[in-house]
Image (tube, rainbow, N blue to C red):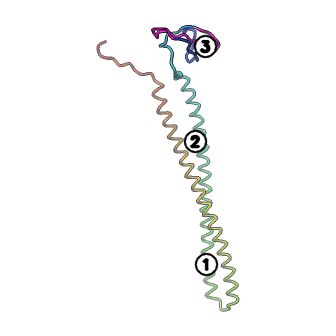
Amino acid sequence: MHRGLPTGTLLSVLATSENQEFTQVTTANGTEGWIRTQYLTDTPPARLTLAAMQGSEAEMRERLQTLQQQLSKSQAEVASAVAALSDSEQALADLNERYTELERLSGNSVELDKTNRSLLQSVETLSAEQETLQAENQRLLERMEYSQFTDGALAVGLGVIITLLIPRLWPQRKRNSGWS
């Protein structure tokens, strides 16, 4: 029966001969017959395994590319947030300097009080904005770290798959004992 079966055909075992040399099998379409037990295996052929692995490798490469694009986008967002934070800190420093200068120059306490209140309100607004930007910056940094971890894990997983797959693609060499 095995001359008519292509490699990788799924067979159901019905019985085994007493000497374990032959096995009675049936195909998915109902063809029944006997085949040498040595031709049967539980594992799919390397050709089918390779095709499945190549498909998953392509998916992983596509996922890796997507994650790299997300990482680039996140890095750009982080850079933008850092620049905005720097601008806010500079504005806060400028307002503090202006407040100090006004306090020094002002002789009128009523005017000084109004200016003081206005500057304090500006400082509070900028401080709140700075805290918001710092929180956003922290969130973006965490997202970037997670993305880098995922990229590393995918790269390691792909390396493991390739390391396990490549030795199985080439047949094992038979070793000569020297007595031949």
* Viewport quadrant of the C terminus: top left
* Foreground pick, 41 / 61: 41
Mark number for residue 124?
A: none
SS under mark 1: helix
> Which residue is at the front of the view, 113 or 81?
113
Residue 24 in magenta stretch: yes
Q: Position of residue 30 (x, y in %)?
A: 64, 11
- Mark 1: few, some, or many residues within 10 Å (few <14, many ≥20)? some
Residue occupying the point 54% across, 10% down: 24
Element type where label 3 sits in the image: strand
Coordinates of residue 133 in the picture (x, y in percent)? 63, 64
Badge nearest the viewer, 3 or 2: 3
Q: Which residues are magenta?
A: 16-32
Point out the residue furthest to the front here.
18
* Whether residue 86 is situated above or below residue 58 in the rendered picture: below
Q: Mark on residue 64? A: 2
Report how far apart the C-alphas of labels 2 and 1 lie in the structure.
Answer: 47 Å
**Residue at image coords 51%, 15%:** 40
Asked where in the image residue 88 lies, by quadrant, the reply is bottom right
- Three-letter residue code for mark 2: Leu
Position in image of residue 2 (x %, y %): 54, 9
Query: Pointer 3: residues within 10 angstroms few (<14), some, or many (20+)?
Result: some
Q: Earlier in the sequence, mark 2 or mark 1?
A: 2
The residue beneath circle 1 is 96
Residue 60 included in the magenta stretch of the image: no
Q: Is residue 166 above or below residue 91?
A: above
Q: Which residue is mark 3?
A: 27
Mark 3 and mark 1 lie on one chain; the one further toward the N terminus is 3
Indicate which label's residue lies in the foreground, 3 or 1.
3
